[in-house]
Image (tube, rainbow, N blue to C red):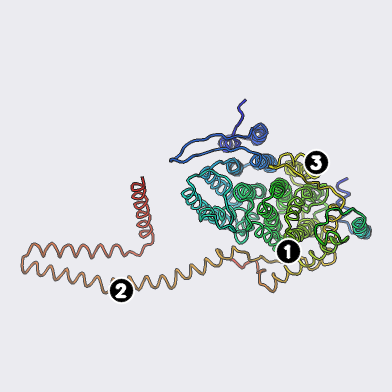
Amino acid sequence: MIKSIVDFFGDEAYARQRRRMFYLALVLIVVADFLVRREHAEYLWDRLPGWSAVYGFGSCVLLIFVSKFLGHQGGLMRREDYYD
Amino acid sequence: MTEFVHPALLYILGALPIPFLQGAIRKAYLLLIPVLAILAVLAMQPGSYGAAQFIGQEILIAKVDKLSIVFATVFTIMALIGMVYALHLTRAGEHVAAFVYVGSALGVVFAGDYLTLYLFWEGMAFASAYLVFAQGGDQAVRAAFRYLMVHITGGVVLLGGVVLHGLATGSLLFGPIEGGPIGGTMDAGAYLILAGFLLNAAVPPLNAWLTDAYPEATVTGAVFMSAFTTKTAVYVLARAFPGTELLVWLGTAMALYGVVYAVLENDCRRLLAYHIVSQVGYMVAGIGIGTEMAVNGATSHAFAHILYKALLFMGAGAVIYVTGRRKLTELGGLYRSMPLTVALYMVGAFAISAFPFFSGFVTKSMVVAAAGQDHRALVVLALTMASSGTFLHTGLKLPYYMFFGTDRRLEAREPPGNMLAAMAMAAALCIAIGVFPETLYALLPYWVDFAPYTGVHITESLGVLMFTALGFVLFLRALDPENTISIDTDWFYRKGARYFMWLAERPLARYETVVSDLSETAALPFLHGTARAGLRVDLNAVDAVVNGVARAILKGGGRLRRLQTGVVTHYALAMIAGVIAATAIFAVVWQ
């Protein structure tokens, strides 16, 4: 059973199915975020349904590009024999 | 039954017979000691044990309370899992080192005074360094030396702090250090102690030893290392410095620091090592906040972290064990031949990313919620961003390029049964903590008032995580690993030290040559000339007094020349003799 689950995520044959499930999950999560009860809204964003989705996506993109910028333009990434 | 058996003693004395045992008996023994240690921790009662006097100071070998018990519990469980993972090793050395390492970590956890703590602290450094040395090869040995040097330096700083703090307060007992850096009441000794602790917690800029050495360790050694050194540091910080404002900001910064470097990393275990830095950031920040909920959060997160991080290291280690490759640019397509490893690794990945029903969900969120309760909006936002990065790397990037991605057609199979069993044990605990958090909450130092499973918490967590996945899917090409290494603060002792050596070899050495040339060309001929003149005066005037003076000068000249050998070892010997003499005089006068 474990092998078939892992295969589902790896095999090219299931690519369409995987993509559909993924986008469905995204929609469901945002819808659910609009439906849940918000009792202790301490911060502004606590009251905004869908905020976490926006923040998660934004964080991800920011981290990828800021890090790569620091790596390439900031000189953090070096050839593997740099210390030799 | 006695109410306290020190588990450190079980491990350290228990390490002695290992080289003399063989085959199945050794394997049984390697599992017996960790099981006994778990029982010893379960059976122990809070209290103070092993109080004594040493050079006029109070010593307390073991102080047992809720905080030390919770750390000891996870340490002993982890040690058992680690031993199962390493059971196939035939060489005794690594087993002995692992035992001493675990024993020393437990010694630190129970230490009631700074001298006991320091002793075990150094034991950890040496035993863990062996796990890197054991890998062999030029690269690993160099990394191990750097690791050892950094930890010895940290140890000296800690010892200096302990002595100063002891002199200032009159007690070496280990406990909360009053006053924070903001209050300005912390003495110099306390700052040095803090620096020593922060080094072992891998707080930037003192983090590079971790990401430098862990990926060079043996496959099984890295699993032990991922669990003990940083988490004992978290424990001592929680014990001595709760509520220190500085730690909030250091912890938050390091949570993001590790994530940024993880984007750039190509070595699978170094990527995971950067996530240790990131995850320990949550704990350090929690300790800095210092409220009951925050310390609970930091402690429970350390508990969960040890298990899922070890699981991740075991998964990456299994890949290295089977394929002999460690770079993401050289891995891919292993899911067909290693499905069990993939599944078990993913449990660890879900746990570290804080998916509902996995351990991170009930522990990491406690730290974030504590920051929220303490009205620290910026910390909440930064830690949530770091969570997104955690899933991006350990849950998406690493498994994608290691197990899926481009099929490199590598010869692979599942790792040996004992490795899979160890991973299964850790995975089971990751899920158990996520599903039944009450058991862990009951162990925490303070009463827990936190319900992780609320509707809004679940949808918000899933929102952050799944939309991170969306970002990953959309920008996958930007994340392709590159054949590079990243410059971290180890630059200062790897490259910076070379510049220092150049300075020492060129300008300083030249200066030294000039000085000794001057003395040989100018001073010595003058002395010789004087001596000869003296001899002539002596011969001509037959003056016994002058004779003696001349001989003395001749001898002095020769001696002066001998002193100027230029051989560094002679100078070093003279310095050491001087230090010993000064210490002896100081000790006598001081008494």
**Residue B557: quadrant of the picture:** bottom left
**Is there any visible trace of residue B292 in the rendered image?**
yes
Q: Is there any visible trace of residue B27 in the rendered image?
A: no
Mark 2 touching mark 3, by CB under 8 A? no
Q: Earlier in the sequence, mark 1 or mark 3?
A: 1
Residue on which disc 3 sits: B436
Of the residues shown, which amino acid type is indicated by label 1?
Answer: Val
Question: Which one is closest to the eye, mark 2 or mark 3?
Answer: 3
Mark 3 belongs to which amino acid? Phe
Task: Point out the frontmost of discs 1 and 2.
Answer: 1
Residue named by callout 2: B518
Mark 2–mark 3 distance (CA, rounded to whole Å): 79 Å
Query: Which residue in the protein does label 1 denote?
Result: B263
- Residue B255 sits above or below residue B20 on the image: below
Label 1 environment density (alpha carbons within 10 Å; few <14, some 14–19, many ≥20): many
Give residue B178's position: percent from left, percent from top. Answer: 57, 50
Estimate the spatial distance between the alpha carbons at disc 1 and disc 3, rounded to whole Å.
33 Å
CA–CA distance between discs 1 and 2?
57 Å
Q: Percent x, y for residue B101?
A: 59, 44
The answer to which quarter of the image holds residue B194 is bottom right
